[in-house]
């Protein structure tokens, strides 16, 4: 997968070079390029913002630097998708996906992470100030499948933190990025429920014991206990998720936990 991120703070994205994602880039599984939006300005101050039409507080990101930056990204993606098509790796929509982080977007979920992990290319446009001139999104729709996406119902200073979270959640689903693919199967949100509690050695620590069933070696009992714990935890912390889960897996009483 190729990922391009456009930001006025490219150094903000540096952690995406670390750990599992860093290794994925070294192994050629993931190609990540971060572009400085100011490289697409031509005035002495490398201006990317201006006052909002209609008045009000704050500044708005100017359209032209965004158009130039996204044109460059689009060209790189088209070439990539063209070569993928020749090797029949491009199976999804023809237009590359452009994610625009925004508190006014659809909320990012594990389901969306899975969907995006199947794309051969992804682009992210990090807003700052009061956001990007809306016409950029309208213009970009002719080239990209534009998706405004929110990390959650709160407001960040810029899109960079949101992009880091989304890129990590998406990239770890690409085959080969996480060493043991089994670890992706039982995670929170993989089946609509939260994960069961986990423990490691020692079995007794500061007066607190690991649940006996986990020491039993009885795989059937362990699987049953874990499933119950998933349901109990989900009912206690995120009851709304149970509405989307398979109700037949839920036995009475667990909602009261
Ligand atoms: N005025 C905007 C509004 O009320 O919708 C908020 C602008 S915010 C200060 C600046 C930038 O941070 C946004 O353009 C977006 O890129 C990013 N951002 C802020 N909150 C976010 C969230 N919850 N999810 C994703 N991106 C967010």
Image: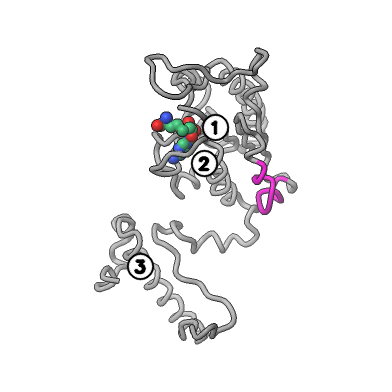
Q: Taking 225 as reference, is 61 above or below it?
A: above
Q: Could you tell me if the residues under marks 1 and 2 are in contact, i.e. CB atoms within 8 Å? A: yes
User: In this image, 257 relative to 149: left or right?
Assistant: left
Quadrant of the rendered structure where residue 43 is? top right
Which colour assignment does the render follow? one colour
Q: Earlier in the sequence, mark 3 or mark 1?
A: 1
* The N terminus sits in image quarter: top right
Magenta residue span:
14-25
Q: CA distance from mark 2 to mark 3?
A: 29 Å
Q: Is residue 200 visible?
A: yes
Q: Earlier in the sequence, mark 2 or mark 3?
A: 2
Taking the spot 37% from the left edge, 67% from the top edge, the residue there is 233
* Magenta stretch encompasses residue 35: no
Residue that numbered label 1 is attached to: 126
Bin the neighbour count of mark 1 within 10 Å (Cα to Cα): few under 14, some 14-19, many 20 and up: many
Secondary structure beneath label 3: helix
Secondary structure beneath label 1: loop
Q: Position of residue 18 (x, y in %)?
A: 69, 50
* Magenta stretch encompasses residue 19: yes
* Pointer 2 residue Cβ closer than 8 Å to ligand 1: yes
Given this view, does label 2 or label 3 mark the residue nearer the observer?
2
User: Depth check: 51 or 198 in front?
Assistant: 51
Q: Is residue 101 visible?
A: no
Quadrant of the rendered structure where residue 241 is? bottom left
**Which disc, if any, is residue 161?**
none
**Which disc, if any, is residue 231?**
3
> Magenta span: helix, strand or loop, mainly?
helix
């Amino acid at each position: 997968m190729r990922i391009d991120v456009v930001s006025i703070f490219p150094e903000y994205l540096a952690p995406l070079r670390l750990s599992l994602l860093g290794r994925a880039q070294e192994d050629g599984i993931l190609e990540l390029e971060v572009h400085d939006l100011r490289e697409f300005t031509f005035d002495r101050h490398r201006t990317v913002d201006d006052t909002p039409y209609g008045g009000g507080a704050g500044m708005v990101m100017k359209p032209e630097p965004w158009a130039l930056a996204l044109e460059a990204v689009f060209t790189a993606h088209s070439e990539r998708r063209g070569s993928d098509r020749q090797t029949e790796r491009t199976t999804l929509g023809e237009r590359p996906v452009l994610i625009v982080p925004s508190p006014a977007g659809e909320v990012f979920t594990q389901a969306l992470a899975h969907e995006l992990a199947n794309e051969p290319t992804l682009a992210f446009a990090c807003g700052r100030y009061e956001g990007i001139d809306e016409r950029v999104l309208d213009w970009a729709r002719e080239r990209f499948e534009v998706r405004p996406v929110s990390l959650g119902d709160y407001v960040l200073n810029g899109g960079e933190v949101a992009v880091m979270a989304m890129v990590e959640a998406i990239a770890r689903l690409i085959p080969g990025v996480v060493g043991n693919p089994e670890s992706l199967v039982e995670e929170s949100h993989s089946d609509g429920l939260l994960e069961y509690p986990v423990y490691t050695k020692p079995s007794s620590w500061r007066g607190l014991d690991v649940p006996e069933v986990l020491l039993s070696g009885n795989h059937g009992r362990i699987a049953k206990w874990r499933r119950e714990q998933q349901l109990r935890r989900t009912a206690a912390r995120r009851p709304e998720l149970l509405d989307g889960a398979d109700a037949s897996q839920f036995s009475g009483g667990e909602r009261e936990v």
